[in-house]
């Protein structure tokens, strides 16, 4: 074979190789620039573009004196880009572990793990770079500054906001909380979320191959708007007094649950509200979900004797009785609308009582006879006017309770309803019903929010007192306030609610709980609802205690009434409540 032939063969082979190489390159270019063009351009754009969310700061919640109840602090989410880690920074890893309180082995694993396998939409597995791994979710600013000083390339933080509650469990059920995902869950945080939340902003720009921002290529930037602030009607001094009293009687009586509401009756503003058991909203996840609910508006119970004030007010307002009228409370049955109705038992035997004494001594039989003077539909109408069977308008989580329509009454309803049985209400509904007497016959909407204001203190929204409707006449309300002050007097069933020097009006109650379909003799709800001074009400207090352990029947006059007294006495000075100018009251102080 000649040398010329061999040279031509090699030349042809080389030419074929070159042609094949160029063909492969050309085919690859066509594949990338035609078939995969859209996908690749998308990847490039995503790598070049930088989109940052500028988080807004949630507004504060303060009490009526300006004390901070809920606020937001800035924290750092610390992470690392493993692709940027340098071997020369390895000596600093131990210091980073100390500052972050992480194990050095975890640090080494995260820093050296630069790739991960993922599956795309077609099920194919591909290897991708890891560009971010979180090290610490919430780092304080001071510690982050020390991390920055370590100058470990690739380790950096993103600023975010965290909700905190400086007063911890104080007024927890009123304030509510924001969960880890940033969602307002309960309380004022939820009901006022529209005002508190604010509006996030954003920034669009480009970055270079080292993932650094190219500020000159910013295409759009929208500033965030911080949320507005909420001022509550809650007074932190009142709230402290309530919760201290709860702590005292929980230790003494170990109840299953309890609720206390304190308000300014003339405005409907809630000055304090607390439930037991309670929780710390800073660590809400440590408590059972049932503890988070505000029992004052979510739980229902049979109100018992405080409801007698509703019954008596309704009959008096219709001028169907006077307080000197006599009632035979020794009878166990009575003829009513052509049939015999069995009357309920009294807590002790009574004989002939005046209308005034029926209320003062809390006779079940006497108040049942009062109610029978009213037409059933008219009685039902009054109950609804007092706010039972409808939401009070307090806010998040509230239920309506249950008032049976007249057509659903059974043969005993007319004798049991007047004493607060056969009806379900929330503590807030009973509190508002009693306030009708304190306000001169007007039902006020309970309010927990006073105003919405901005960073400069300017009021944006003002929540003025709101009267819902007139329920009874002013004369009837004054007469009932007088009778209820006798209930708290020396001969009344609620005398332990008495405050020396002040004319206190109110009514205690002891309602049996229904256990397995029957009224229980061992399970009781003790309650008291009242206000003072009776002639010029400044403060209204409602106490509900579920299953107090007292060794005998947990009468409301023995368990709940003293709690109201203790709270009232502790608040007289700080709220500057002037004494009543009533001689009989001062005489009673000596007893």
Image (cartoon, grey):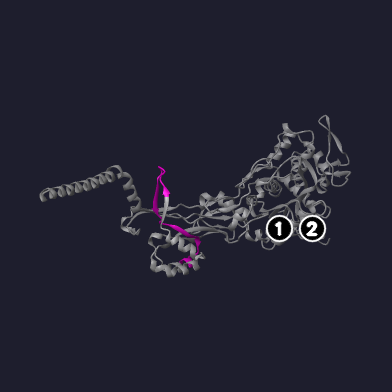
Residue marked by disc 2: 585
Would residue 534 appear left or right of 165 to someone viewing this image?
A: right
SS state under label 1: helix
Q: Is residue 134 magenta?
A: yes
Mark earlier in primary sequence (1, 2): 1
Residue 121 against residue 188 in the figure, above or below? above
SS state under label 2: helix
For the residue pair 432 and 533, the one nearer the viewer reads as 432
Residue marked by disc 1: 246
For mark 1, does the 10 Å Cα neighbourhood hold few (<14), some (14 to 19), or many (20 or more) residues?
many
Determine contact: label 1, label 2, CB under 8 Å: no
Q: Is residue 127 magenta?
A: yes
Tell me, for residue 145, which label it has, or none: none
x and y percent of residue 390 in the render? 65, 41
Residue 337 against residue 544 in the figure, above or below? above
Q: Residue at x 73, y 32 (%)?
A: 408
For the residue pair 384 and 156, the one nearer the viewer reads as 156
x and y percent of residue 53 in the render? 42, 54
Q: How many marks?
A: 2
Q: Which residues are magenta?
A: 118-144
State the separation of the CA atoms marked 1 and 2. 27 Å
Quadrant (top left/top right/bottom left/bottom right) for the C terminus: bottom right
Would residue 113 appear left or right of 448 to someone viewing this image?
A: left
């Amino acid at each position: 074979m000649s040398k010329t032939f061999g040279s031509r063969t090699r030349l042809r082979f080389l030419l074929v190789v070159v042609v094949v190489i160029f063909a492969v390159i050309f085919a690859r270019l066509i594949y990338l620039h035609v078939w995969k063009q859209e996908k690749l351009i998308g990847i490039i754009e995503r790598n070049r573009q930088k989109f940052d969310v500028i988080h807004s700061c949630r507004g504060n919640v303060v009490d009526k004196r300006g004390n901070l109840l809920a606020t937001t602090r800035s924290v750092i989410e610390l992470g690392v880009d493993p692709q940027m880690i340098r071997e020369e920074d390895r000596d600093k890893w131990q210091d980073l572990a100390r500052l972050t309180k992480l194990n050095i082995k975890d640090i080494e694993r995260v820093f050296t793990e630069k790739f991960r396998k993922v599956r795309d939409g077609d099920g194919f597995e591909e290897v991708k770079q890891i560009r971010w791994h979180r090290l610490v979710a919430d780092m304080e600013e001071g510690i982050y500054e020390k991390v920055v000083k370590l100058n470990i390339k690739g380790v950096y933080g993103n600023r975010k906001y965290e909700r905190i509650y400086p007063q911890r469990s104080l007024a927890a059920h009123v304030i509510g909380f924001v969960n880890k995902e940033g969602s307002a869950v309960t309380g004022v945080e939820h009901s006022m979320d529209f005002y508190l939340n604010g509006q996030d902003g954003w920034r669009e720009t480009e970055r270079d191959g080292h993932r650094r921002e190219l500020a000159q290529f910013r295409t759009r930037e929208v500033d965030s708007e911080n949320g507005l602030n909420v001022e509550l009607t809650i007074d932190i001094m009142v709230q402290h007094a309530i919760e201290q009293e709860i702590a005292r009687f929980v230790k003494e009586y170990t109840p299953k649950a309890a609720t206390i509401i304190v308000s300014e009756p003339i405005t409907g503003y809630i000055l304090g509200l607390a439930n037991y058991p309670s929780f710390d909203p800073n660590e809400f996840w440590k408590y059972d979900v049932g503890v988070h609910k505000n029992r004052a508006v979510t739980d229902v119970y049979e109100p018992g004797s405080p409801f007698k004030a509703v019954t008596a007010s309704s009959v008096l307002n219709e001028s169907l009785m006077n307080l000197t009228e006599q009632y035979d409370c020794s009878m166990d049955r009575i003829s009513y609308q052509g049939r015999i109705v069995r009357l309920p038992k009294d807590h002790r035997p009574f004989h002939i009582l005046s209308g005034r004494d029926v209320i003062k001594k809390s006779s079940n039989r006497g108040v049942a006879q009062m109610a029978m003077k009213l037409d059933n539909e008219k009685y039902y109408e009054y109950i609804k006017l007092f706010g039972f069977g409808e939401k009070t308008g307090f806010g998040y989580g509230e239920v309506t309770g249950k008032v049976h329509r007249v057509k659903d009454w059974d043969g005993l309803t007319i004798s049991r309803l007047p004493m607060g049985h056969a009806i379900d209400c929330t503590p807030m509904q009973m509190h508002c019903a009693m306030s009708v007497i304190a306000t001169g016959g007007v039902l006020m909407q309970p309010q927990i929010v006073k105003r919405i204001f901005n960073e400069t203190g300017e009021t944006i929204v003002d929540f003025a007192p709101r009267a819902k409707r007139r329920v009874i006449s002013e004369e009837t309300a004054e007469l009932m306030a007088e009778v209820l002050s006798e209930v708290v007097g020396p001969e009344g069933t609620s005398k332990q609610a008495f405050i020396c020097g002040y004319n206190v009006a109110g009514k205690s109650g002891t309602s049996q709980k229904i256990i397995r379909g029957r009224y229980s003799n061992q399970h009781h709800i003790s309650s008291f609802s009242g206000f003072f001074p009776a002639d010029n009400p400044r403060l209204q207090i409602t106490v509900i205690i579920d299953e107090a352990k007292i060794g005998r029947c947990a009468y409301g006059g023995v368990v709940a009434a003293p709690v109201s007294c203790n709270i009232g006495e502790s608040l007289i000075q700080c709220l500057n409540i002037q004494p009543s100018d009533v001689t009989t009251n001062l005489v009673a102080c000596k007893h």
